[in-house]
Structures are given as structure tokens and as C-alpha cells.
Image (cartoon, rainbow, N blue to C red):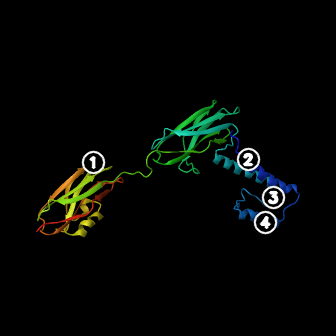
Amino acid sequence: MHTPSFTSTALLALLTIAFIAAPLTGVEASNGDRGNHYGWYKKNKFENRGYFPFYGYGSTASLQAYIEQLQALLRLLQEQSGDTYSNNLNVTTKTANEVTDAAATLRGYIDFSANEDEAEVYFEYGTSRTNLNKTTSREDLEDSDTPFSERVTSLEEGTVYYFRAAATDEDGDTDYGATLSFRTTGDANSAEEEPSVTTKAASDVEDTSAELNGTVAMNDFEDGRVFFVYGTDEDAVGDASDENEYSDITEDGDDLRKVEVDADLNGTSSYTLTVTSLDEDTTYYFRLAVEYEDEDGDSDIEFGSLRSFTTSD
């Protein structure tokens, strides 16, 4: 087994001696003394009487109960720190390897004592050092001191994981290795990149016609429906971005029009739309847009910036 740390061993020894000292004086604490003692521990945040039974501490039975509960607490501290409370096993956590954005191989090593020849080994892991809430499948090992490992998958990319090796002997006692950590590769905040739309300046502007220009990059999405909206009403053209589907944008004479230029875009493409039958000496507003299906399967529209031009006399 692991040798308990000096800190935990000393803690048990000092507290045990302190509480043995009181009954050795042969003085039974009065009710007032008990209250004073309890008040001190309450002030110092030791209110859990399950671990600190101060009432009647002068009795041998009460002292024994205290020592047993203190030992239980010490075992819990040992477990969390990687110490052991199995006399028959010694488990070591080894560093993880073959770490990718979604998987890693956890490794450990077990030493059997002369009194033990069989154990179940496994790993505990999670994203919090104090809450290793996932457990690998258990593997039976017999007789020989040996390394063991387990491949864990479905991890989040760019995330720190904590883990420790563990083994349970035939008596049901468990030995834990120290808690180690690793970070998966990649960006923890990564997500599919939405389409990007650029509305470019109008060209070849005449008295009744003009060319509208722009570029769409679908990035991590596909099957984009590309279209221009334009018109003489700046608010109507700008408010088109309130809609999530092409079919929801309602045309309104010269104030707002829409024209599809690509029904199935994958990748990146540039577009030019020639619009005619415009009014002379009139300011028009326009923008390029693409409708696509987002990562949740819902329709959405990405719009480029709003631009304008004025026809000649």
C-alpha cells in the first residue's frame, strides 16, 4: 500500500493525543465546559458533530467513537489526495498519452502484496478535480504486477480532464493513485463557422439601371440560397434581416424587392445582378444575403452590409 503522507498521519496522531489527554486527568467536563468547547469549534467552523462528538468526551466510549469517526475522515482525505486504505494493493496513476481532440489513453500501474493476487482495475475521470464523475469499465487482473490502460472517447476538445487509476481487492477495499490531468487538443470554444456575406459597391450606375455586387462564403455550411434585396426605402431593405427565411421577405413595389441569384451554393462565389427599370435621380439601397440551414437544422439568413447608390438624371 502507499505510505500515508506525514501531514495526514501527524493530524491523526496529534488530535488523538489531544482527546486522550482530557480523560487521563480524571476530570469530567461540566455542562458549561462542554458548551465552551463546542462554542470554540463552532466559531472555527467545526460544527459537524458527526466527526466531532464533544459532548461527554470524558467517557471512554465517546472518545472511541470520536477516534473511529476521525479515522473515517482521514480515510476520505487519503482517498482524495491519492493515499490508500487498502493493505493489499499499491496503485500508481501514470500520465495520459495519445491525447487527441476527443480521446485519450489513461494509464496506471498496480503492485500486489504477498496477501493479494486479484483485483479489479479502472479509472475515474472528469472535468473537475473534485468531481471525477465518469468511470471506465473494470478489468480483472491477477497475480502479476503490471501496467494497465483504457482508451476514453467522446471528450470535449480543448478541455482539461482530471483522472486517477483505481483498484479494488477481493475484500472490497480500494486503492487510488494520485489525480493527474491532461488537456485535449483543439479549441474549447470552436463551433461551425457561419457563412460570411460581403456587399460590394454598385457599379455601372446609369439613369435607370445599375449592377449590384457581392460575395458569399459558405464556410462550414452548404446548400446556400443567395439573393439580393434592394429598394428605395432604407428601413424596408434594412429590416429584411429580421427574417429567417427567404419566403418570409415580402416585396413592396419600389420600396423593397428581392432577386435570387443562386439556389444551391457550396463554397465561395461572387455575384453581380443587373437591375433595370429604376427611377432617375433616385437613391436605392441594397444588400446581399444567403439563406442556409444552421447546425440545429433551422433556416437562417446571413446578410451583408447595407449599401446605396443614386441613379443619374
- Marked residue nearer the N-terminal end (1 or 4): 4
Which residue is denoted by mark 3 in the rendering?
57
Which residue is denoted by mark 1 in the rendering?
267
Q: Nearer the viewer, mark 1 or mark 4?
A: 1
Q: Is residue 275 shown above or below 181?
A: below
User: Residue 240's spot in the image, x, y percent?
Assistant: 26, 64
> Who's the residue at 60% across and 32% down the image?
146
User: Residue 308's spot in the image, x, y percent?
Assistant: 21, 65
**Hey, what amino acid is under mark 2?**
Thr
Whether residue 289 is visible: no
Whether residue 38 is visible: yes
Element marked by disc 4: helix
Q: Quadrant of residue 204?
A: bottom left
Foreground residue, 138 or 130?
130
**Hey, what amino acid is under mark 3?**
Tyr
Element marked by disc 2: helix
**Hey, what amino acid is under mark 4?**
Asn
Q: How many marks?
A: 4
User: Residue 276's spot in the image, x, y percent?
Assistant: 12, 62
Q: Quadrant of residue 90?
A: top right
Q: Nearer the viewer, mark 4 or mark 2?
A: 2
Which residue is denoted by mark 2 in the rendering?
9
- Marked residue nearer the N-terminal end (2 or 1): 2
Q: CA distance from mark 1 to mark 3?
A: 78 Å
